Amino acid sequence: MAGSTHTVTNQAPPLVGHDVFTGDRALTAAVERHLAPELREEALAELSGLGRSCGSLQAREWGEQANTNPPVLRTHDRYGHRVDEVDFHPAWHRLLGKGVAAGLTAAWTRPGGHVRRAAGFLMWTQVEAGNCCPLSMTHAAVPALRADPGLAAEWEPRLTSRVYDRELRPARLKAGALFGMGMTEKQGGSDVRANTTSARPLAEDGTYELTGHKWFCSAPMSDGFLVLARAPGGLTCFLVPRVLADGTRNVFLIQRLKDKLGNRSNASAEVEFDGTWARRVGEEGRGVSVIIDMVAATRVDCVLGSAGLMRQAVAQAVHHCGYREAFGAKLADQPLMRNVLADLAIESEAATTLALRLAAAQDAAGDGDERERALLRLAVPAAKYWVTKRCAPVVVEAAECLGGNGYVEESGMPRLVRESPLNSIWEGAGNVQALDVLRALGREPLAMDAYLTEVGLARGADHRLDAAIRGLLTELADLAGAEGRARRLVERLALVLQGSLLVRYAPPEVADAFCAARLGGDGGAAFGTLPPTLDLASVVERARPGA
């Protein structure tokens, strides 16, 4: 009789054993929309395969294990030799190997590669976001290395390989390689021009010796790193290999690993250079312009990562509320909870739709489309600012939908909550993005022309969007003293762009809800304040994770 009190009822089953790709209607629609017809069949099949892996119990267990067992720094071996290695749990290597094999560093090697990779990256973030950092850095290093055709020819095949080789050995002996990045220093932070790391030229042309430090160095067990240092000609980009060609270790002194709020499976390190060998990438004094393409690519990944976290949080909330009953009905069928879920769902879909539009622009820009390249110049920092900032409140509200269950580690929601602020901080926090948008507005008129052309494609379809565009044009007409209101301006740029995309591509009930609440002012500061006259049931049903 004692056991009868432990009968378990009214609990949602775990959200496992499903296809994360085909069950995400906004994502599948975006992939179909942005890929050429001849690419769709292969891409959809490939992404569905990855989606089933993402939704599997095995992948969920790997994510939990990697997060529960964070990396450990070993500075010396048993004999006292300096080794500077980071040990990871086996689950980390399984995740990273799967991500590499899925092509998450190979966007540059095939038509439609950025859209296909973006969809995969958005899904893989939902399994364990920490391992996405080295995947992102490796992917983003390719355009920076192209500043030196010789280096690009040597390294690009390794970085875009689908082979994960974890061993530290000369890159020429490896079938695949990963890259990290080190830009910020203690005294400078986002102001990389304050960097003090010095680069002394060596006898061999293009080679240098680095002395200095990096306050944040991503993925310290990578095969190579792009870093900034001050050469005689000014701030310059360098490639620092982890292992030299003769098999000896380069001087790469890991001082400690950061003890972070979230992203705990991933190692972020403080490193010292003391006579470290490096190859110059591009010309002396052009370091920022060389590495800026890498930064732009990682910023797109911040948008994708936040969209992925939001999608996973909303999927968990809708799934839970579709099973859980209270006061005689399923939570998802109760008007107030339905309003909350619908509000979260439109935020998630807006993020996904914008993120995949950026990926499509990357593909087009790579094919020589200058209008798309100009659009990216403005849309990337605006999207990075807004989407990453919306992530944390969405995830926290979604956790609340699970009640006390959402506050318990086994639900997975606390890990999402801890991860949710990360993309807003990394690769330039909010003010950095807002100021970057102002620079684009002031210096690159083609960027604003491309943006207005894009949002103008939806003109006349929704009166609230039309009014928001007119209001935005008024704000853009006078940029004097704009720095103090830059966040407000960038927020409006992002919202209008999201609204225009949803009006063109999303179901009417989704676009209507977004325009009402985000552009028309018919919504409150908290989630769950949509006008009750909208078709909220259809919005929630669209967000339900499919089988």
Image (spheres, rainbow, N blue to C red):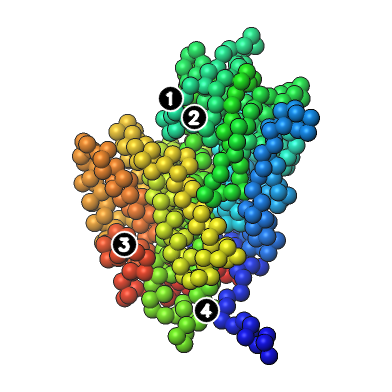
Q: Which residue is mark 3?
A: 525
What x and y, as percent, mark residue 328? Answer: 46, 87
Answer with mark 3 or mark 4, whichever residue precedes in sequence. Answer: 4
For marks 2 and 4, the one nearer the N-term is 2
The three-letter amino acid code for the residue at tag 3 is Ala
Labels 2 and 1 touching (C-beta < 8 A): yes
Contact between labelled residues 4 and 3, with CB atoms less than 8 Å apart? no
Q: Local crowd at mark 4 within 10 Å, few (<14), some, or many (≥20)?
A: some
CA gap, disc 3 and disc 4: 26 Å
Q: Which residue is mark 4?
A: 324
SS assignment at label 1: helix
Can residue 27 be seen?
Answer: no
Observer-nearest residue: 50 or 137? 137
Element carrying mark 4: loop
Report the residue at 30% width, 55% height from top: 459
Distance (Cα) linking label 3 and label 1: 39 Å
Residue 502 position in % (x across, y down): 39, 59
Secondary structure found at label 3: loop
Q: Is the residue under label 3 in contact with that under label 2 (CB below 8 Å)? A: no
Q: Earlier in the sequence, mark 1 or mark 4?
A: 1
Residue type at tag 2: Glu
Q: Residue at x 55, y 66 (%)?
A: 408
Q: List the residue tagged with mark 1.
A: 194
Which residue has dot 2 on it?
185
**What amino acid type is highlighted by mark number 1?**
Ala
Q: Could you say which is closer to the camera, residue 341 or residue 82?
A: 82
Q: Residues within 10 Å of mark 2 (few under 14, many from 20)?
A: many
The kind of secondary structure element at disc 2 is: loop
- Residue type, numbered disc 4: Arg
Q: Is residue 123 above or below residue 288?
A: below
